[in-house]
Image: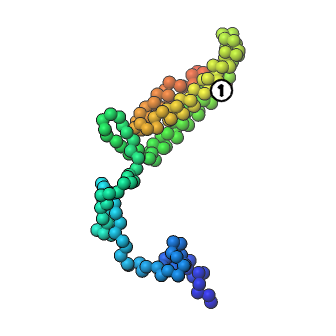
Amino acid sequence: MPTGRDDDALRWDGDDDPTLDVGAEPGAVPEPAGAPAEAAALPEGWNAVGRGSETVDRDADADVDVRPEAADTGDTGESRVREPMGNAELIALGVLGGFSLLYAVGWLIGGLRLQAVAEFLVAPIAYQVSLWLAVLAPLVWFTTVCLLTAGSRPWVRFAWLAGGVVLLLPWPFIMVGVIGR
């Protein structure tokens, strides 16, 4: 029975296999797992934690700042790192985006339902232009708020989006509905 690479899938060991070392030169002997590594250097302001942190040296002459980019918050001199959105923020953003999409459909259905009545009030071309502007308004509002508030705090984004939900209600659909009276 062969005892080669076929048995590796059945065991947890095998990390010390010299054929798996990609960076090793041919013929070089890999270092044992317990061998001490060279002392690494950290830039100013960084602290090493965890196993082996006592062997890390401070490098005062480090010319590369590897910290994440900080967003400047204004003239106060403070800076903060932008955190990714959490689950609640993503779900709320999806719900508000869904409202925008449903509002666009509501404006389309309600506007098409009122088209016969609107012929007596405005020119047909004016009605078509206003209908499509009304249909696109919730989608444009959602996209604009998301783009313009990308660097601000989440509550600012959700306040503007909630304002759009209230402001852009599809009144023709609410008042007349799909079937009408």
Query: Which of 82/28 is in front?
Result: 28
Spot occupied by residue 86 in the image (x, y as percentages of width and height): 44, 47
Q: How is the image coloured?
A: rainbow
Residue 75, percent across and down? 32, 34
- Quadrant of the frame with the C terminus: top right
Which residue is located at x 52 percent, y 76 percent?
A: 25
Tell me if residue 173 can be seen. no
Crowding near the residue tagged with mark 1, few <14, some 14–19, many ≥20 C-alpha atoms within 10 Å: some
Say which quadrant the N terminus sits in.
bottom right
In depth, the one of 144 and 114 nearer the eye is 144
Q: What number of labels is visible? A: 1
Judged left or right of residue 65, residue 108 is right
Going 61% across and 23% down the picture, which residue do you hit? 133
- In the image as oriented, which residue stretches furthest toward the top? 120
| Residue 79 horizontal/vertical position (percent) | 34, 42
The reply to whether residue 8 is in sight is yes
**Residue where numbered disc 1 is placed:** 109
Depicted 27 relative to depicted 85: above or below: below
Q: Which amino acid does label 1 sit on?
A: Ile
Q: Position of residue 145 (x, y in %)?
A: 49, 32
At 56% from the left edge and 37% from the top edge, which residue is drawn?
98
Is label 1 in a helix, a strand or a loop? helix
Q: In which quarter of the image is residue 110?
A: top right
Looking at the picture, tell me which residue is in the foreground, 34 or 153. 34
Residue at image x 62%, y 30%?
A: 105
Taking the view exactly as shown, the residue that stands out farthest to the bottom is 1
Q: Using the image, determine if residue 122 lies above or below residue 141.
A: above
